[in-house]
Protein backbone atom coordinates (compact mmCIF):
# COMPACT_ATOMS: atom_id res chain seq x y z
CA UNK A 1 0.00 0.00 0.00
CA UNK A 2 2.73 2.44 1.02
CA UNK A 3 4.81 1.49 -2.01
CA UNK A 4 1.84 2.13 -4.30
CA UNK A 5 1.26 5.50 -2.62
CA UNK A 6 4.88 6.54 -3.12
CA UNK A 7 4.75 5.45 -6.76
CA UNK A 8 1.60 7.52 -7.38
CA UNK A 9 3.15 10.56 -5.69
CA UNK A 10 6.31 10.26 -7.80
CA UNK A 11 4.24 10.06 -11.01
CA UNK A 12 2.31 13.13 -9.85
CA UNK A 13 5.54 15.06 -9.18
CA UNK A 14 6.74 14.18 -12.69
CA UNK A 15 3.58 15.68 -14.20
CA UNK A 16 3.83 18.78 -11.99
CA UNK A 17 7.42 19.38 -13.13
CA UNK A 18 6.37 18.95 -16.77
CA UNK A 19 3.60 21.51 -16.21
CA UNK A 20 6.13 23.98 -14.78
CA UNK A 21 8.45 23.48 -17.76
CA UNK A 22 5.51 24.03 -20.11
CA UNK A 23 4.66 27.28 -18.34
CA UNK A 24 8.12 28.57 -19.13
CA UNK A 25 8.42 27.26 -22.68
CA UNK A 26 5.07 27.73 -24.42
CA UNK A 27 4.58 30.94 -26.41
CA UNK A 28 1.22 32.57 -25.59
CA UNK A 29 -1.57 32.69 -23.00
CA UNK A 30 -3.81 30.17 -24.71
CA UNK A 31 -1.21 27.44 -25.05
CA UNK A 32 0.19 28.21 -21.59
CA UNK A 33 -3.23 27.63 -20.08
CA UNK A 34 -3.08 24.02 -21.34
CA UNK A 35 0.15 23.47 -19.44
CA UNK A 36 -0.87 25.32 -16.28
CA UNK A 37 -4.25 23.85 -15.65
CA UNK A 38 -4.30 20.55 -17.42
CA UNK A 39 -1.14 18.58 -16.83
CA UNK A 40 -1.41 20.24 -13.46
CA UNK A 41 -4.78 18.70 -12.73
CA UNK A 42 -3.52 15.18 -13.49
CA UNK A 43 -0.43 15.79 -11.35
CA UNK A 44 -2.54 17.08 -8.47
CA UNK A 45 -4.90 14.11 -8.82
CA UNK A 46 -1.99 11.65 -8.70
CA UNK A 47 -0.34 13.29 -5.66
CA UNK A 48 -3.60 13.56 -3.72
CA UNK A 49 -4.59 9.98 -4.57
CA UNK A 50 -1.19 8.82 -3.32
CA UNK A 51 -1.63 10.75 -0.06
CA UNK A 52 -5.12 9.27 0.33
CA UNK A 53 -3.75 5.76 -0.14
CA UNK A 54 -1.02 6.49 2.41
CA UNK A 55 -3.68 7.37 4.98
CA UNK A 56 -5.34 3.97 4.59
CA UNK A 57 -9.10 3.41 4.46
CA UNK A 58 -11.05 5.65 6.78
CA UNK A 59 -12.41 9.12 7.30
CA UNK A 60 -9.12 10.83 6.38
CA UNK A 61 -9.06 9.14 2.98
CA UNK A 62 -12.61 10.31 2.30
CA UNK A 63 -11.70 13.88 3.23
CA UNK A 64 -8.71 13.93 0.90
CA UNK A 65 -10.93 12.50 -1.85
CA UNK A 66 -13.34 15.42 -1.30
CA UNK A 67 -10.48 17.85 -1.98
CA UNK A 68 -9.53 15.81 -5.06
CA UNK A 69 -13.03 15.95 -6.54
CA UNK A 70 -13.27 19.66 -5.75
CA UNK A 71 -9.98 20.32 -7.53
CA UNK A 72 -11.09 18.28 -10.54
CA UNK A 73 -14.35 20.26 -10.79
CA UNK A 74 -12.90 23.74 -10.15
CA UNK A 75 -9.62 23.68 -12.10
CA UNK A 76 -11.19 23.64 -15.59
CA UNK A 77 -13.66 26.32 -14.59
CA UNK A 78 -10.84 28.68 -13.54
CA UNK A 79 -8.90 27.97 -16.75
CA UNK A 80 -12.00 28.59 -18.86
CA UNK A 81 -12.78 31.88 -17.08
CA UNK A 82 -9.24 33.19 -17.59
CA UNK A 83 -9.04 32.17 -21.24
CA UNK A 84 -12.47 33.58 -22.01
CA UNK A 85 -11.49 36.89 -20.41
CA UNK A 86 -8.32 36.95 -22.53
CA UNK A 87 -10.31 36.22 -25.70
CA UNK A 88 -12.95 38.85 -24.99
CA UNK A 89 -10.31 41.43 -24.10
CA UNK A 90 -9.06 41.14 -27.67
CA UNK A 91 -6.08 38.81 -27.42
CA UNK A 92 -5.84 36.57 -30.49
CA UNK A 93 -4.12 33.19 -30.19
CA UNK A 94 -0.98 32.56 -32.14
CA UNK A 95 -1.79 30.17 -35.00
CA UNK A 96 0.23 28.12 -37.45
CA UNK A 97 0.49 30.82 -40.10
CA UNK A 98 2.17 33.34 -37.78
CA UNK A 99 5.11 31.14 -36.97
CA UNK B 1 -40.93 19.39 -15.62
CA UNK B 2 -42.82 19.90 -12.38
CA UNK B 3 -41.34 17.27 -10.14
CA UNK B 4 -42.60 16.83 -6.62
CA UNK B 5 -41.23 19.22 -4.02
CA UNK B 6 -41.04 16.75 -1.09
CA UNK B 7 -39.06 14.17 -3.08
CA UNK B 8 -36.47 16.73 -4.13
CA UNK B 9 -36.33 18.14 -0.62
CA UNK B 10 -35.53 14.74 0.88
CA UNK B 11 -32.88 14.05 -1.78
CA UNK B 12 -31.19 17.41 -1.20
CA UNK B 13 -31.25 16.95 2.57
CA UNK B 14 -29.67 13.51 2.32
CA UNK B 15 -26.94 14.74 -0.03
CA UNK B 16 -26.09 17.65 2.25
CA UNK B 17 -26.13 15.43 5.35
CA UNK B 18 -23.69 13.01 3.70
CA UNK B 19 -21.40 15.97 3.02
CA UNK B 20 -21.68 16.97 6.67
CA UNK B 21 -20.83 13.42 7.82
CA UNK B 22 -17.69 13.34 5.67
CA UNK B 23 -16.44 16.78 6.59
CA UNK B 24 -17.32 16.93 10.29
CA UNK B 25 -15.84 13.71 11.69
CA UNK B 26 -17.70 13.99 15.03
CA UNK B 27 -20.42 11.40 15.53
CA UNK B 28 -22.00 12.12 18.94
CA UNK B 29 -25.71 12.84 19.17
CA UNK B 30 -25.42 16.61 19.60
CA UNK B 31 -23.40 17.13 16.43
CA UNK B 32 -25.56 14.74 14.38
CA UNK B 33 -28.77 16.60 15.31
CA UNK B 34 -27.08 19.94 14.64
CA UNK B 35 -25.94 18.79 11.21
CA UNK B 36 -29.32 17.36 10.30
CA UNK B 37 -31.07 20.61 11.27
CA UNK B 38 -28.61 22.68 9.27
CA UNK B 39 -28.92 20.52 6.16
CA UNK B 40 -32.74 20.59 6.41
CA UNK B 41 -32.65 24.40 6.55
CA UNK B 42 -30.27 24.78 3.61
CA UNK B 43 -32.23 22.27 1.51
CA UNK B 44 -35.50 24.05 2.32
CA UNK B 45 -34.03 27.37 1.18
CA UNK B 46 -32.60 25.89 -2.02
CA UNK B 47 -35.28 23.53 -3.30
CA UNK B 48 -37.86 24.41 -5.89
CA UNK B 49 -36.11 26.68 -8.33
CA UNK B 50 -37.82 26.32 -11.71
CA UNK B 51 -35.80 25.09 -14.73
CA UNK B 52 -32.99 23.70 -12.65
CA UNK B 53 -30.81 21.50 -14.88
CA UNK B 54 -30.31 19.09 -12.00
CA UNK B 55 -33.93 17.95 -12.12
CA UNK B 56 -33.36 15.29 -14.76
CA UNK B 57 -29.66 14.79 -14.30
CA UNK B 58 -28.67 11.14 -14.98
CA UNK B 59 -26.32 10.59 -12.05
CA UNK B 60 -26.10 6.83 -12.58
CA UNK B 61 -24.84 6.93 -16.16
CA UNK B 62 -22.67 9.92 -15.27
CA UNK B 63 -20.71 7.67 -12.89
CA UNK B 64 -20.11 5.28 -15.81
CA UNK B 65 -18.90 8.18 -17.94
CA UNK B 66 -16.19 9.24 -15.46
CA UNK B 67 -13.74 6.30 -15.94
CA UNK B 68 -13.81 6.79 -19.72
CA UNK B 69 -13.06 10.49 -19.24
CA UNK B 70 -10.22 9.64 -16.88
CA UNK B 71 -8.65 7.33 -19.48
CA UNK B 72 -8.90 10.12 -22.04
CA UNK B 73 -7.21 12.52 -19.60
CA UNK B 74 -4.29 10.14 -19.04
CA UNK B 75 -3.90 9.47 -22.76
CA UNK B 76 -3.83 13.11 -23.81
CA UNK B 77 -1.67 14.07 -20.81
CA UNK B 78 1.00 11.73 -22.11
CA UNK B 79 0.61 13.29 -25.55
CA UNK B 80 0.99 16.83 -24.15
CA UNK B 81 3.98 15.72 -22.06
CA UNK B 82 5.70 14.46 -25.20
CA UNK B 83 4.98 17.78 -26.93
CA UNK B 84 6.38 19.88 -24.09
CA UNK B 85 9.52 17.82 -23.52
CA UNK B 86 10.33 17.74 -27.24
CA UNK B 87 13.24 20.18 -27.78
CA UNK B 88 11.80 21.58 -31.02
CA UNK B 89 8.35 22.23 -29.44
CA UNK B 90 6.19 21.01 -32.38
CA UNK B 91 2.90 22.66 -31.45
CA UNK B 92 0.31 23.82 -33.98
CA UNK B 93 -2.25 25.85 -32.02
CA UNK B 94 -5.55 26.58 -33.72
CA UNK B 95 -9.13 27.59 -32.97
CA UNK B 96 -11.96 25.20 -33.82
CA UNK B 97 -15.60 26.26 -34.17
CA UNK B 98 -17.93 23.36 -33.56
CA UNK B 99 -21.70 23.15 -33.49
CA UNK B 100 -22.96 20.57 -31.04
CA UNK B 101 -26.33 18.83 -31.34
CA UNK B 102 -26.94 18.28 -27.65
CA UNK B 103 -30.03 19.98 -26.27
CA UNK B 104 -29.97 19.40 -22.52
CA UNK B 105 -28.22 22.34 -20.81
CA UNK B 106 -26.53 20.02 -18.34
CA UNK B 107 -25.10 18.04 -21.26
CA UNK B 108 -23.58 21.19 -22.76
CA UNK B 109 -22.02 22.14 -19.42
CA UNK B 110 -20.56 18.66 -18.96
CA UNK B 111 -19.23 18.66 -22.53
CA UNK B 112 -17.50 22.02 -22.06
CA UNK B 113 -16.04 20.93 -18.73
CA UNK B 114 -14.77 17.64 -20.16
CA UNK B 115 -13.16 19.42 -23.11
CA UNK B 116 -11.34 21.77 -20.74
CA UNK B 117 -10.35 18.93 -18.42
CA UNK B 118 -8.82 16.96 -21.29
CA UNK B 119 -5.27 18.23 -21.82
CA UNK B 120 -4.60 19.81 -25.20
CA UNK B 121 -8.03 21.33 -25.70
CA UNK B 122 -9.67 24.20 -23.86
CA UNK B 123 -13.12 25.74 -24.26
CA UNK B 124 -12.76 29.43 -25.06
CA UNK B 125 -16.40 30.35 -25.48
CA UNK B 126 -19.83 28.72 -25.59
CA UNK B 127 -22.65 30.53 -27.34
CA UNK B 128 -25.93 28.60 -27.28
CA UNK B 129 -24.52 25.29 -28.44
CA UNK B 130 -21.71 26.61 -30.61
CA UNK B 131 -18.34 25.82 -29.11
CA UNK B 132 -15.11 27.74 -29.71
CA UNK B 133 -12.28 25.41 -28.77
CA UNK B 134 -8.55 26.11 -28.67
CA UNK B 135 -6.53 23.00 -29.54
CA UNK B 136 -2.76 22.79 -29.21
CA UNK B 137 -2.31 20.13 -31.87
CA UNK B 138 -4.16 18.42 -34.67
CA UNK B 139 -4.51 15.11 -32.88
CA UNK B 140 -5.54 16.84 -29.63
CA UNK B 141 -8.56 18.36 -31.33
CA UNK B 142 -9.46 15.16 -33.17
CA UNK B 143 -11.37 13.71 -30.27
CA UNK B 144 -13.70 16.66 -30.38
CA UNK B 145 -14.10 17.29 -34.11
CA UNK B 146 -14.95 13.67 -34.84
CA UNK B 147 -17.70 13.84 -32.21
CA UNK B 148 -16.44 10.97 -30.09
CA UNK B 149 -17.01 12.78 -26.81
CA UNK B 150 -20.37 14.07 -27.96
CA UNK B 151 -21.61 10.57 -28.88
CA UNK B 152 -20.65 9.38 -25.42
CA UNK B 153 -22.56 12.24 -23.81
CA UNK B 154 -25.56 11.67 -26.06
CA UNK B 155 -25.63 8.15 -24.65
CA UNK B 156 -25.33 9.48 -21.10
CA UNK B 157 -28.25 11.88 -21.54
CA UNK B 158 -30.21 9.49 -23.80
CA UNK B 159 -30.60 11.95 -26.67
CA UNK B 160 -31.12 11.16 -30.34
CA UNK B 161 -28.36 12.60 -32.46
CA UNK B 162 -27.62 11.45 -35.98
CA UNK B 163 -23.88 11.27 -35.33
CA UNK C 1 9.05 8.30 5.51
CA UNK C 2 9.39 11.83 6.86
CA UNK C 3 12.34 12.35 4.50
CA UNK C 4 10.15 11.55 1.52
CA UNK C 5 7.52 14.09 2.56
CA UNK C 6 10.24 16.67 3.16
CA UNK C 7 11.47 16.04 -0.38
CA UNK C 8 7.87 16.48 -1.62
CA UNK C 9 7.50 19.78 0.26
CA UNK C 10 10.79 21.15 -1.11
CA UNK C 11 9.87 20.14 -4.68
CA UNK C 12 6.49 21.83 -4.40
CA UNK C 13 8.09 25.02 -3.05
CA UNK C 14 10.54 25.03 -5.94
CA UNK C 15 7.65 24.63 -8.41
CA UNK C 16 5.93 27.61 -6.77
CA UNK C 17 9.08 29.63 -7.50
CA UNK C 18 8.89 28.62 -11.17
CA UNK C 19 5.28 29.83 -11.36
CA UNK C 20 6.30 33.00 -9.54
CA UNK C 21 8.69 33.70 -12.41
CA UNK C 22 5.70 33.58 -14.77
CA UNK C 23 3.69 35.87 -12.48
CA UNK C 24 6.44 38.50 -12.34
CA UNK C 25 7.63 38.15 -15.93
CA UNK C 26 4.31 37.55 -17.74
CA UNK C 27 3.86 39.67 -20.88
CA UNK C 28 0.12 40.13 -20.36
CA UNK C 29 -1.95 40.33 -17.23
CA UNK C 30 -3.68 37.03 -18.07
CA UNK C 31 -0.37 35.21 -17.77
CA UNK C 32 -0.14 36.53 -14.24
CA UNK C 33 -3.66 35.31 -13.42
CA UNK C 34 -2.84 31.86 -14.80
CA UNK C 35 0.35 31.75 -12.76
CA UNK C 36 -1.60 32.62 -9.63
CA UNK C 37 -4.06 29.79 -10.36
CA UNK C 38 -1.13 27.38 -10.64
CA UNK C 39 0.34 28.62 -7.37
CA UNK C 40 -2.96 28.08 -5.55
CA UNK C 41 -3.16 24.50 -6.81
CA UNK C 42 0.33 23.91 -5.41
CA UNK C 43 -0.68 25.55 -2.12
CA UNK C 44 -3.67 23.21 -1.81
CA UNK C 45 -1.44 20.15 -2.26
CA UNK C 46 1.08 21.69 0.15
CA UNK C 47 -1.66 21.96 2.78
CA UNK C 48 -2.59 18.30 2.52
CA UNK C 49 1.08 17.21 2.65
CA UNK C 50 1.61 19.35 5.76
CA UNK C 51 -1.39 17.63 7.32
CA UNK C 52 0.13 14.23 6.58
CA UNK C 53 3.45 15.29 8.13
CA UNK C 54 1.86 16.64 11.33
CA UNK C 55 -0.75 13.82 11.55
CA UNK C 56 -3.62 16.34 11.57
CA UNK C 57 -5.09 15.65 8.11
CA UNK C 58 -8.68 16.40 9.17
CA UNK C 59 -7.76 19.99 10.09
CA UNK C 60 -5.49 20.78 7.13
CA UNK C 61 -7.96 19.32 4.62
CA UNK C 62 -10.56 21.83 5.78
CA UNK C 63 -8.06 24.63 5.24
CA UNK C 64 -7.31 23.30 1.77
CA UNK C 65 -11.00 23.11 0.88
CA UNK C 66 -11.51 26.71 1.96
CA UNK C 67 -8.46 27.75 -0.03
CA UNK C 68 -9.78 26.02 -3.17
CA UNK C 69 -13.15 27.77 -2.93
CA UNK C 70 -11.56 31.18 -2.26
CA UNK C 71 -9.27 30.62 -5.23
CA UNK C 72 -12.30 30.03 -7.46
CA UNK C 73 -14.04 33.19 -6.30
CA UNK C 74 -10.89 35.28 -6.64
CA UNK C 75 -10.16 34.01 -10.16
CA UNK C 76 -13.76 34.77 -11.19
CA UNK C 77 -13.55 38.30 -9.80
CA UNK C 78 -10.28 39.06 -11.60
CA UNK C 79 -11.48 37.49 -14.87
CA UNK C 80 -14.76 39.40 -14.80
CA UNK C 81 -13.02 42.69 -14.06
CA UNK C 82 -10.47 42.26 -16.85
CA UNK C 83 -13.16 41.14 -19.29
CA UNK C 84 -15.17 44.30 -18.76
CA UNK C 85 -12.18 46.64 -18.76
CA UNK C 86 -11.34 45.46 -22.26
CA UNK C 87 -7.65 46.10 -22.77
CA UNK C 88 -5.04 43.42 -22.03
Image (cartoon, rainbow, N blue to C red):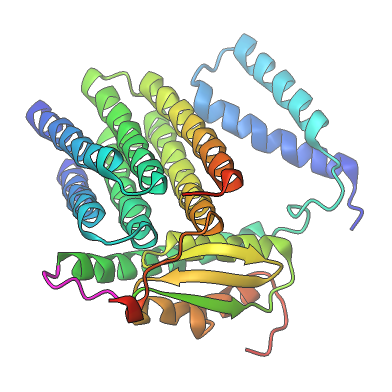
Q: Position of residue A42 (x, y in %)?
A: 33, 54
- Residue at 58 percent across and 63 percent down: it is B125
Query: How many tags in the picture?
Result: 0
> What residue occupies the far top of the structure in this picture?
B30
Identify the image quadrant of residue B28.
top right
Would residue B79 be counted in the magenta stretch? no
Q: Is residue C23 above or below residue B83?
A: above
Q: Looking at the picture, how far across and down is residue B30, in whole percent?
A: 63, 9
- Which of the image's four quarters has the C terminus of chain B? bottom right
Q: Position of residue A40 (x, y in %)?
A: 31, 51
Q: Is residue A56 above or below residue B109?
A: above
Q: Nearer the viewer, residue B13 or A92?
A: A92
Q: Residue at x 62, y 64 (%)?
A: B126
Magenta stretch in the rendered image: B86-92
Q: Is residue B61 visible?
A: no
Question: Going by the image, does A79 lie left or right of A96?
Answer: right
What quarter of the picture does the N terminus of chain B occupy? bottom right
Q: Residue furthest front?
A: C87
Dominant secondary structure (helix, strand or loop) of the stretch shown in magenta: loop
- The residue at 22%/40% (across/down) is C21
Amino acid sequence: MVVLAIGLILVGIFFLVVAAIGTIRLPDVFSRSHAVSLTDSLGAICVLAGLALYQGFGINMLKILVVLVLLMLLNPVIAHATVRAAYRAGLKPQTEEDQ
Amino acid sequence: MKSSFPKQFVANTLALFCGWLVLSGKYDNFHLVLGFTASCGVAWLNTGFPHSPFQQFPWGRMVLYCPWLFLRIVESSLHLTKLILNPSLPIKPRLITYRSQLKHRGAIVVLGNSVTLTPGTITVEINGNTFLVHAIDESAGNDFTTGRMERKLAWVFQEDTNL
Amino acid sequence: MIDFFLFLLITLSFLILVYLYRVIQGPTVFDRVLGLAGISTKAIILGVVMGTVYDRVEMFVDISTGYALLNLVGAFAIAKFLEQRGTP
